Amino acid sequence: EADIYQTPRYLVIGTGKKITLECSQTMGHDKMYWYQQDPGMELHLIHYSYGVNSTEKGDLSSESTVSRIRTEHFPLTLESARPSHTSQYLCASSEPGTSGEETQYFGPGTRLLVL
Amino acid sequence: KNQVEQSPQSLIILEGKNCTLQCNYTVSPFSNLRWYKQDTGRGPVSLTIMTFSENTKSNRRYTATLDADTKQSSLHITASQLSDSASYICVVSDRGSTLGRLYFGRGTQLTVWP
């Protein structure tokens, strides 16, 4: 069981609200990620970080922003939520393997519903 | 275009039966391939990782195969249990370093009935 946590697990909010999805890991991993996943679809990378003060945009354009002030914490913020943001958001962290391959550990996810 | 295709999209089997899930990829260069299990409402959990030189790898009742020449992988589940009901996701990495990119399949939704 990976030591990576996400809160809240479920969130229902109205359009226009500002929300922050929390993600924290206690494994000391430098690299962290945010993915968006819709039912029956593949995971899409929206943000990632190589370490403290490092944030990069992923493959899928997203209106969300992230910050990395501490190694263990990687929150994602939506300034003004819209129904199109309804999805599952998965946070992950990774460590390099003995042969260079990364192992990603995923949190349980946050299911967001914007009305 | 780098892609990962999985089949079947969904599968229903009876408890105790075996099944095989398929993954075809066009990712190049190739570094490694992982199979993840994702329970409903949870994040994916890694089952096995295969590198270019590996053909078969087993993890309890899960056996993964890799044919790097044809760019195909399979995940065989033996003596299925109700707890095997989940989505199984194939993920291919194009490099082994932290600069590598991951390509995700859409998963095969497996349902095991009693």
Image (cartoon, rainbow, N blue to C red):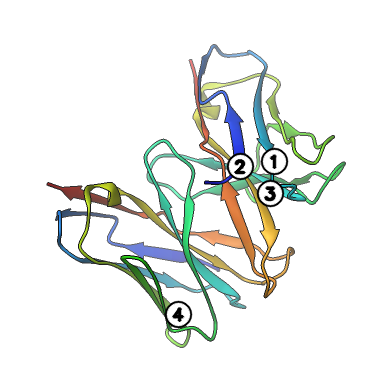
Tell me: A115 left or right of A34: left
Write down the residue under mark 4. B71
Alpha carbons under labels 3 and 1: distance apart: 23 Å
- Quarter of the image where one finds residue A61: top right
Q: Amino acid at mark 2?
A: Asp
Please identify, in this view, whether the residue under mark 1 or under mark 4 is nearer the observer. Answer: 1
Q: Earlier in the sequence, mark 2 or mark 1?
A: 2
Disc 1: CA contacts within 10 A as few (<14), some (14-19) or many (>=20) = few
Query: Mark 2 belongs to which subunit?
Result: A
Query: Mark 4 belongs to which subunit?
Result: B
Write down the residue under mark 3. A58
| SS at badge 2 | loop
Q: Amino acid at mark 4?
A: Lys
Q: Amino acid at mark 1?
A: Thr
Please identify, in this view, whether the residue under mark 4 or under mark 2 is nearer the observer. Answer: 2
Q: Amino acid at mark 3?
A: Gly
Whether the residues at callouts 3 and 1 have beta carbons within 8 Å, the answer is: no
Q: What is the number of the mark on residue B59? A: none
Write down the residue under mark 1. A26
